[in-house]
Structures are given as C-alpha cells and as structure tokens.
Amino acid sequence: MRQIDLHKVADEAPFTRYHGLVLFWCALIIIFDGYDLAVAGIALPSIMKQMGVDPTQAGFMVSSALFGMMFGAIFLGTIADRIGRRWAIAICIALFSIFTAAAGLTNDPVWFSVTRFLAGLGIGGVMPNVVAQMTEYSPRRLRATLVTLMFSGYAVGGMLAAVLGKGLIESHGWQSVFLAAALPVLLIPFILKSLPESMPFLLKRGRHDELKAILGKLDPRLQPTAADRFVLPPVEQAASAPVRHLFQDGRGFSTVMFWVAFFMCLFMVYALSSWLTKLMAGAGYTLGSALTFVLTLNFGGMLGAIGGGWLADRFNIKWVLFSMYLLAAVSITLLGVPMPTDALFVVVGLAGASTIGTQIVTYAYAGQFYPMAIRSTGIGFASGVGRSGAILAPIVIGMLVAMALPLQLNFVAIAIPAALAALAVAMIQHDRSATVQATAVRNADAAGVAPLAAAGGGAD
C-alpha cells in the first residue's frame, strides 16, 4: 500500500494539458470578473451625466459594488472550504453576471447601487476561489507564473470593457456594456463539468474515486490503485473553524500584514479604475483618449502580472512584491506631473503594472503562504479586508475631485498607500509560509532530522 501525499504530487507534477485546462477556465472566469468590475468606471462619465449625480455621489455608487465584494470575498471565499470550490465559483459567476446586467436596466442611483452591491458579492467571492484553485493545481516551480498568468485575465477583462466602451457607449448608451455581462451565465454548466474539485475537499468527503481520477490526470506517471492511501502533510491539515488557523502556527502577524497590503493595494487599484477616465477627461483629454488611458493601464497590469509572476518563480516572491509596490508609489505620483502624451502613456502603463499587476502577485503570494486546507479562507479574508480599501477609494478620490484640487494632489493621495503596502510586505514572516514549511518538513524527513529543526530557519 502506497501513501500518496497530495501536496507533493501537485508540487512535483509535470505541466500537462490538464494544467492547461484548469488555467484556461480560471483565466476565463477572471476575464469575466475583470470586465464586470471595470465596466462601472468606464461608463462613469456617461452615468453621471444621465443620472445627474455629482462626483461624491458617483463615488458612493461605484463603491456599492466594492462593498459587496468585501462580503463576497469573506463569505463566498470561506464557504468554498465547506461546499466545494466548484459550486462556490458557479454561484459567484451567476451573481456577478446577472446583477451587472440588471444594473444596465436601472435609471435610478439607488437601484443602480443595489444591483451593483449584489454583483459585487460574486465579483469578490470568485477571486479567492480561483486563486486557490490555480495555486492548488500548479506545479511548484511554475506556481507564481501560472497564478499571475491566470490573474492577468483581470486586466484583459478591463481592456475588454474599455474597448467595448469606446464602441458601444456613444452608439448604444452606457447600458449596453452592462447588459453584455449576462453572457457568462451560459458557461456555468461547462465550468461545473470541466473544473476539478479541491483535492483536500474530496479527501475530507471520502470521494476517493474522484481523487484518483484527478491525480492520474495531474501526473500521468502516477496511477493510483484501490490500495493507495491519500494524505496531506501536517502543515496542510486543518480541523474545524478554519478562520482560527489563520492566526496559528506563527501566521498571526503575517496575516495582519497581508490584510494591510491588500487594503492599500486595492485602494490604489480601485481609485485608478474608478477615476482615471474622469481625471484625464478633466485634464483636457477627450472621452476616447481618456478610455485609451484605461486600456493602457490594464495592458500594463497584464504585463506586470505576467512579469511579476515570472520573477517571483525565480527570486523570492516577497521581495519581488516589495519592489513592485515601490514602483507603484513612483509611477502613480508621476501621473500628475505634466509631460508629453507619449511619456504619459508609458507612465500609465507602469502604474498599471505596479498596481493591477501587483495586486495579482499579492494574491499569488497569499496563495503560497497559507496551507492548502485553509487557502480559500486565508485569501478570502485578506481580499475581504482589502475590499474596505477598495470601498473607500472611489469615495475619497470623489471627494478630492469635488474639491477641485490640483491634479497632482489627487495622484499623490493614490500613491501614498503604495509605500505603506511595501512596508507591510517587508514585515511578512516568509519563513512561516506553507510552501517554505512543507519543503522544510520534506527535507527533514529525507535527511532524518527533526522537522521543527529544519523548519526553524528564516527564508527572507
């Protein structure tokens, strides 16, 4: 009888078509998610004009979705560890698709805010689940690359919203880009059929036949038999009350630092996503040109995510992330400095790479930090706490816009959180991450030494 370590199989598997299938579906889901989130910022000038709202009111309208995202990330991220990740993802897709489309049928600021809140539940809930899914099914040597490549779909969704916005809003009204968001509902049956379930969930429920089938696809060299026994290493196991485990085994301080980093990062991302179009239009650019800046921001975000993931797989992910936050502080500050248009596009791209891209690498780091059994919960709570930063951003920047302050001060206000996020990342105790600890335990077992002695060293 063999004892098969699920985490080790996933870590050491060669990249196969099965990994590519998981990557495809997770990336596609994130593209839909990114579109649904970006569409409000794209249409904001038109919505403000038609509904007759001022910048402060508009900030609250945009934040309604972000408020929903906070609850969605916490509750729908946590519930996946109980009902299974596939069904949690399906519920999230239904929520953000149906209610984003419903927002396009409203003409009242209050009803618009209500539908966006409900859509936000799904937008926020799907992120921790797909990050946990891609992290779990990625080979260790490619993990950060695959997670950030998958999450670059978020920027693709934002670019898709900008492209459709330029073509549809002027000819068919702002409602058209919201109604288009209903299409992903049609893919839910295919996602439920094609996307694998979380392996710890299957193990916990005793669904060993499904687990054997997944392992055979994950690593074709491994063909499980009826006599095999499946296990998780001690560092990957969690009993009841998984939220409590976020603060155990030396993870408490780092959990709080992740929350600070998520808060600051999401503040920057949603401040730019919500107000860049309006700020650039106020600086004298046409609506078409302002939307091109949004397109550039998201394109930079995609490159930053892929590049950051590539660097994170080759260097220490913690310090790669720290450097990206410092780049964000510099590039966002420069957005308010007068410069030639071509140079401004470059700076906007760098800002996208170091905000949207950095957000994605932050998710990847959180996915590697927490053990598999509480990964969705850990990412969900970090994302949920971070949503409070996302909620505040449109409101705070909306108030600054209403005060008619110099353009540069608006961007300085967005840049300050980048420096605070860099400080928080620097204080994360990297040696307590599940990836480092699981590797240390295996090395200790192989060397015949005590696991705690092997795991005690820092990895910063």
Image (spheres, rainbow, N blue to C red):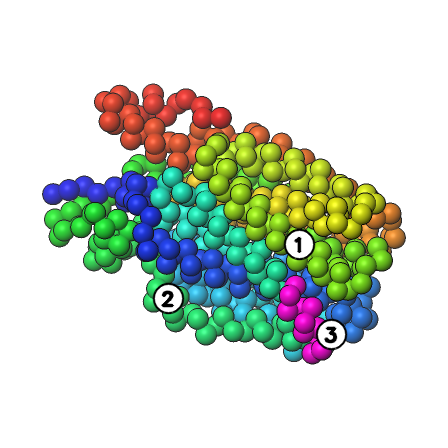
Q: Was residue 171 drawn as part of the magenta stretch in this picture?
A: yes
Residue found at x 61% / y 59% = 158
User: Which residue was labeled with disc 2?
Assistant: 192
In this rendering, the label closer to the viewer, 3 or 2: 3
Numbered circle sitting on residue 170: 3
Any part of residue 238 in sight: no
Q: Amino acid at mark 1?
A: Thr
User: Within 10 Å of the Cα at label 3, are there few (<14), some (14-19), or many (20+) other Cα atoms?
Assistant: few
In this rendering, the label closer to the viewer, 1 or 2: 1
User: Within 10 Å of the Cα at label 1, are there few (<14), some (14-19), or many (20+) other Cα atoms?
Assistant: many
Q: Secondary structure at mark 1?
A: helix
Question: Gap in Å between the C-alphas at discs 3 and 2?
Answer: 37 Å
In the image, which residues are magenta?
Answer: 162-173
Sequence-first disc among 1 and 2: 2
Q: How many marks?
A: 3
Residue found at x 23% / y 50% = 220
At which x and y percent is residue 205? 27, 55
User: Which residue was labeled with disc 1?
Assistant: 296
At which x and y percent is residue 111? 68, 72
At which x and y percent is residue 299? 61, 53
Identify whether 435 is placed above or below 378.
above
Question: Gap in Å between the C-alphas at discs 1 and 3?
Answer: 20 Å
